[in-house]
Amino acid sequence: MRTKKPSGLMSRAGAIRVMTHAMMGAALGLIFSLALAVTNPAVAALIHNGGNQAVVVFVSTLVTTFAIGATLTGVVFMLAEDKEF
């Protein structure tokens, strides 16, 4: 009889892997916000006219959204890896 192994998310290595996914998502969010501001003149004008607060809100919204999405996707992938036999 096989012993039940602990979930990969509950270990130190699992936590590091989840944080790594979150950091990758944050980096992608930063890159996407820069690319969007550079390539889309309407977004660049809105950011320019909005001041510093507009830049902070724009970047933090995209970074947070991408980080949460990448973290949840990483968790799903890790759980799928654990289910493989």
Image (spheres, rainbow, N blue to C red):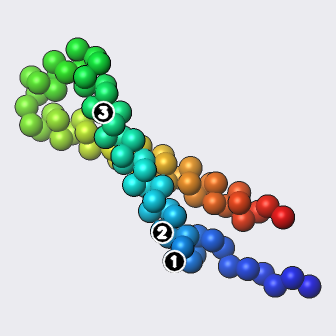
Other-residue count near label 3 (Cα within 10 Å), few / some / many at <14 / 14–19 / ≥20: some
Q: Residue 2: which quarter of the image?
A: bottom right
Q: Could you tell me how far apart the alpha carbons at marks 3 and 2 are, in whole angstroms?
A: 26 Å
56 lies left or right of 73: left
Which amino acid type is shown beneath numbered disc 3? Ser
Q: Earlier in the sequence, mark 3 or mark 2?
A: 2
37 lies left or right of 1: left
Which quadrant would the C terminus be assigned to in this image? bottom right
Q: Could you tell me how far apart the alpha carbons at marks 2 and 1 are, in whole angstroms?
A: 6 Å
Q: Earlier in the sequence, mark 3 or mark 1?
A: 1
Front in this rendered view, residue 77 or 46: 77
Q: Could you tell me how far apart the alpha carbons at marks 3 and 1 are, in whole angstroms?
A: 32 Å
- For label 2, the residue is 16
Other-residue count near label 1 (Cα within 10 Å), few / some / many at <14 / 14–19 / ≥20: few
Above/below status of 71 relative to 2: above
Which quadrant would the N terminus be assigned to in this image? bottom right
Q: Residue 78: which quarter of the image?
A: bottom right
Which amino acid type is shown beneath numbered disc 2? Ile
Above/below status of 8 relative to 41: below
Residue 33: which disc? 3
2 and 1 marks in contact (CB < 8 Å): yes
Above/below status of 76 relative to 7: above
